[in-house]
Amino acid sequence: MKKRRTLLSGIQPSGDLLLGSYFGAIKNWAELAGEYDCFFFIADMHAITVRQNPADLRRRTLQQLAQYIACGIDPETCALFVQSHVSEHAELAWALGCCTMFGELQRMTQFKEKSAKNSENVNAGLFTYPVLMAADILLYQADLVPVGEDQKQHLELTRDIAQRFNGLCGDVFTIPEPYIPKTGARIMSLQDPGNKMSKSDSAAGASVYLLDSPDAVMRAFRRAVTDSGSDIRYDPAGKPGVSNLMQIYSAATGKSFGEIEVEFSGKGYGDFKTAVGETVTELLRPIRERTEDLLKNKDYLASIYKSGAAKASERARRTLGKVYKKLGFAEKA
Ligand code: TYM
């Protein structure tokens, strides 16, 4: 029998889950999951590269697990786990760090952006973060990694590190491919469509979160910044606000930009913003309700992340064992 390929991805619990992360990542996890052996985790070790309130981090970790399930990830067939519960992530990151170049990490745009934003805390973890991400992926011999556009550079570095290690030590790692969706890979702020929608944006209505109330969602879309002119046309350079709303509407409905232009021809921005808001509200309603339900049963959620970590550890231990052997570490008694 042909071996099933492996799919893996993770999200940091550094803030509540964003609509951007839904379209860029989770929606595609759920759609692809049936064809792969799946590993989905909560990247809590990545989250501490920026200072976190411990109680909030713990709460968001469990909430994120509930949201993965509410978004359609089946905990019976996929390993759902918390990154810090599988110690091999940190161990492999050290080994991979020793075959990653300082200059490679210096070129990472996300490092440059995040260190500019957190100038009072440019810690070594923020710098070596892409090595931990490479370890996350390579530990499981992942074939495919569904992520948003902003993670593409980290995936390329992961491939470079894997190829370098394989070249030096013999074939150990599968070389992963990114999976970046055609629409929704880069959702922009509703208040400033020149910038990515992000968890850390505190401007009112700039970001939409999966647990936002219908009122909050409608308000954010009604107030979304649009452009001069009045026609609904896809033109990211000339009409970034409308084009971003079209990305969201297309990702939510599966309609092409051409179909959307026809649907809204002769209508104004106000009608379009209301339609996008209503579509997103209906998309999020069952996710929010299911998440709230799941959060009532903490024991169930704990049982999911425990069995997820057990399944993940099994695969992670195997890879780490091979790596240690190739590196020449003495066998443990
Ligand atoms: P994170 O937590 O910043 O984001 C999680 C996922 O959501 C995508 N995303 C977006 N997609 C479209 N539009 C947006 N505005 C938007 N904002 C975020 C991200 O591309 C990502 O797919 N380093 C990763 C987490 C990680 C990881 C991994 C991912 C750690 N280890 C291993 C894959 C494999 C991160 O910080 O994503």
Image (cartoon, helix red, strand yellow):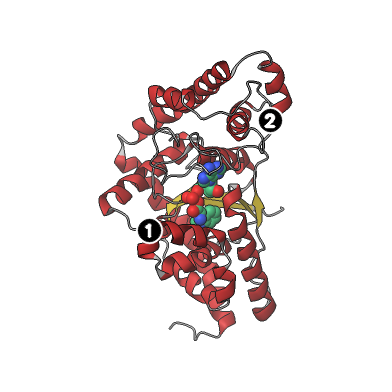
| Amino acid type at mark 2 | Tyr
Measured Cα–Cα span from mark 1 to mark 2: 36 Å
Q: Which residue, given by chain and number where applicable, does mark 1 sit on?
A: 50
Q: Is residue 305 visible from the viewing direction of this image?
A: yes
Residue 92 appears at what percent x and percent y? Answer: 50, 71
Q: Badge 1, how many Cα within 10 Å: few under 14, some, many 20+?
A: some
Disc 1 element: loop
In the image, taking residue 25 as reference, residue 124 lies left or right, namely left
Cβ atoms under marks 1 and 2 closer than 8 Å = no
Disc 2 element: loop
Q: Residue at x 58, y 60 (%)?
A: 154
Residue projecting furthest to the left: 55
Q: Is residue 89 visible from the viewing direction of this image?
A: no
Residue 267 appears at what percent x and percent y? Answer: 63, 14
Residue 20 appears at what percent x and percent y? Answer: 52, 39
Q: Residue at x 35, y 45 (%)?
A: 60
> Relative to 188, does residue 213 appear above or below in the rendering?
above
Q: Which residue, given by chain and number where applicable, does mark 2 sit on?
A: 234
Disc sitting over residue 158 in the figure? none
> Relative to 133, does residue 324 appear above or below in the rendering?
below
The C terminus lies in which quarter of the figure? bottom left
How many numbered discs sit on the rendered protein?
A: 2
Is label 2's Cβ within 8 Å of ligand 1? no
